[in-house]
Amino acid sequence: MNTRGPARLIVVLLLVSITLIAVDQVVGWGLLQQAWSWVSTPLQRWLFDGNEEACDFWERLHEADKMQEENEQLREMVAQLTFENRRYQEIKRENDELRQLLGLQERFPHLERLYAEIIGRDPASVRQVLRVAWSAPADDSVQVEVGMPVIGAAGLVGRVIEVYGHTADILLITDINSSVSAVLQNEDHASGVVDGRWQAGQRLRMRFIPPGSLVQEDDWVVTSGLQRPPFEGRAFPPGLPIGQILRVEVSSDLTLEAELLPAVDFDHLEWVMIVVGTR
């Protein structure tokens, strides 16, 4: 809105008013002054009211700009707080996982362990493999070798299948090439073999459970400690959680089979322990 026009008119009105007052003092033109007042008063009122509205308009515009700037600052603060909260949650989750791994020392004090961090996973791969890395151990005699068991805070993860210096590839128990001797953790303690079934659309399947065995949904399955080829010298330590039974069915040879939900959440796994030996 242009305010220059009203401002100029105000100045003109003031000059005319001053001139008329001076003339009236000299020659006494009272009627002319009254006539001018009658004409100019409504005009002055309109001009000053319009000028006030213009001032209000610019003030509201300034307030709107100020509010927009404050809104932008608030959005930035919300974004920063959201980022910090997510970062805190990630650090907390990682710390919880590391504490659980440390808790395994009390459950399995006879195992010699090497902590390793997940540094790679390929969701498009045809194999269920994770790559891990670790810092050089203080004891130079500690060496990671093919076939060594790998465990997580919640249970069994898999085996080392390749070693590259201080990194290694881990074949997960969900891979179709994985096979683990297992036992039911119930009063029957029936044994069997847990195979990976990821490539077949499942996760884990326990086979060769003797007919008539007590097997129920939600039962836990753990490692038995028995050796399985081709890692006869690298048996999984007994008692490690493998998974929980989802459903049970009878196979063609009348033995029982069960589908398992893995104990470990492989999609969110960050740290593992490589079992490098026993005490």
Image (tube, grey):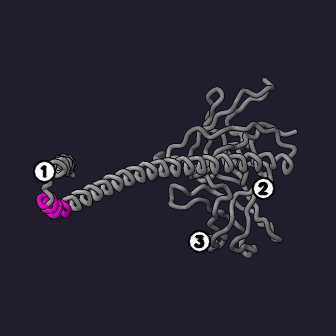
Region of the chain picked out in magenta, as a range: 31-42
| Residues tagged 1 and 2 counted as in contact (Cβ below 8 A) | no
Q: In this view of the protein, can residue 208 be seen by the observer?
A: yes
Callout 1 crowding tier (Cα within 10 Å): few <14, some 14–19, many ≥20: few
Percent from the top left, x then y, of residue 44?
21, 58
| Residues tagged 2 and 3 counted as in contact (Cβ below 8 A) | no
Magenta residues, dominant SS class: helix
Between 100 and 54, the residue placed more toward the observer is 54
2 vs 3, front mark: 2
Residue to which mark 3 is pinned: 252
Percent from the top left, x then y, of residue 233?
76, 40
Callout 3 crowding tier (Cα within 10 Å): few <14, some 14–19, many ≥20: few
Percent from the top left, x then y, of residue 108?
84, 48
For the residue marked with disc 3, what is the amino acid?
Ser
Residue to which mark 2 is pinned: 224
Residue beneath the point at 61% across and 44% down: 171
For the residue marked with disc 2, what is the amino acid?
Ser
Q: Is residue 41 magenta?
A: yes
Between 259 and 117, the residue placed more toward the observer is 117
Residue 189 as seen in the image, left or right of residue 265: right
Residue 25 as seen in the image, left or right of residue 132: left
For the residue marked with disc 1, what is the amino acid?
Val
Q: Which mark is residue 87?
A: none
Q: Which mark is residue 27?
A: 1
Between 156 and 119, the residue placed more toward the observer is 119
Report the quarter where the C terminus lies: top right
1 vs 2, front mark: 1
Percent from the top left, x then y, of residue 79?
51, 49
